[in-house]
Image (spheres, rainbow, N blue to C red):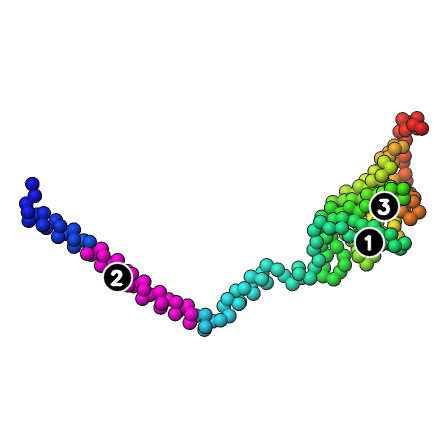
Amino acid sequence: MLEPKEIDNYFRATQTAKNTSVGGHTRLVTFIKLALPGLAAILAVTLLVFPSIKEEAKNFALDFAIGRGDIEKMNIENTTIYVTDNKNRINNFTSSQIKETSAGSKLYDLISPEAIIPLDNKEWISIQAPKGFYDQQKALLELHPEVEAFYSKGMSIQTTQAFFNFKESRGYSNQPVNGDGFLGQIKAQGFEFSTQYKTLTFVGKTTIIIDEESLKKE
């Protein structure tokens, strides 16, 4: 068993440890109370002496993120462009992205362009490609590199480059073309079509392979 003196010494040691802990906590709180106002004063003086620090940092971030040339260039996604021809007929083409090549040039890079060209009697021609250019001043659409043209009566044409002039309502290609229609297959060195005169002409050396079954159809 513990002697009475040992018990007294135990409780005195415990009380001393508690007092030491409380004293340390009190000193820490006192230090924080004194230090925080001083730190706040230092920050306030820094902002007064160097007022341009915040503004310079903000300007740097804006200049880094957006260049002036990018702001001036037109960049539109998923839109339709309407163009009027010489007879005031409205044609249009769509594109997933239209981006001006340089500010004020009116020459645009196109992603996934497709032109829908209406004809008489509810007929139409669709011409599309993965990429293209549009010259707004000339109303000229260029498509490349895998161009497909569809005629609503059942003909399709494939080539590597094609143009459509909206003012003249005329499309053409000077590249080799392959076509499939209700009569058979067509190969030529180019083609030209006019929605105004309702004509489709294959140019250069042209080969037509007629499907025998199509000749038997009335």
What quarter of the picture does the C terminus occupy? Answer: top right
Q: Which residue is mark 2?
A: 27
Per the rendered image, the range of residues in magenta is 19-45
Q: Where residue 124 appears, x then y in whole percent?
A: 85, 43
Please state which amino acid type lies under the numbered disc 1: Val
How many badges with numbers are in the image?
Answer: 3
- The residue at 71%/58% (across/down) is 74
Q: Which residue is mark 1?
A: 83
- The residue at 66%/59% (across/down) is 70
- The dominant secondary structure in magenta is helix
Q: Where residue 146 appears, x then y in whole percent?
A: 77, 42
- The residue at 47%/71% (across/down) is 50
- The residue at 84%/52% (across/down) is 90
Q: Which residue is mark 3?
A: 118
Please state if 204 lies on the left or on the right of 128 as rendered.
right
The numbered mark, 1 or 2, whose residue comes first in the sequence reads 2
* Label 2: element kind: helix
The numbered mark, 3 or 1, whose residue comes first in the sequence reads 1
**Which one is in front, 156 or 89?**
89
Please state which amino acid type lies under the numbered disc 3: Pro
Please state which amino acid type lies under the numbered disc 2: Arg
74 vs 194: above or below: below
Q: CA distance from mark 1 to mark 2?
A: 81 Å
What quarter of the picture does the N terminus occupy? Answer: top left
Q: Where residue 29 appears, x then y in whole percent?
A: 29, 61
* Label 3: element kind: strand
209 vs 21: above or below: above
Could you say which disc has been placed on residue 172 in the image? none
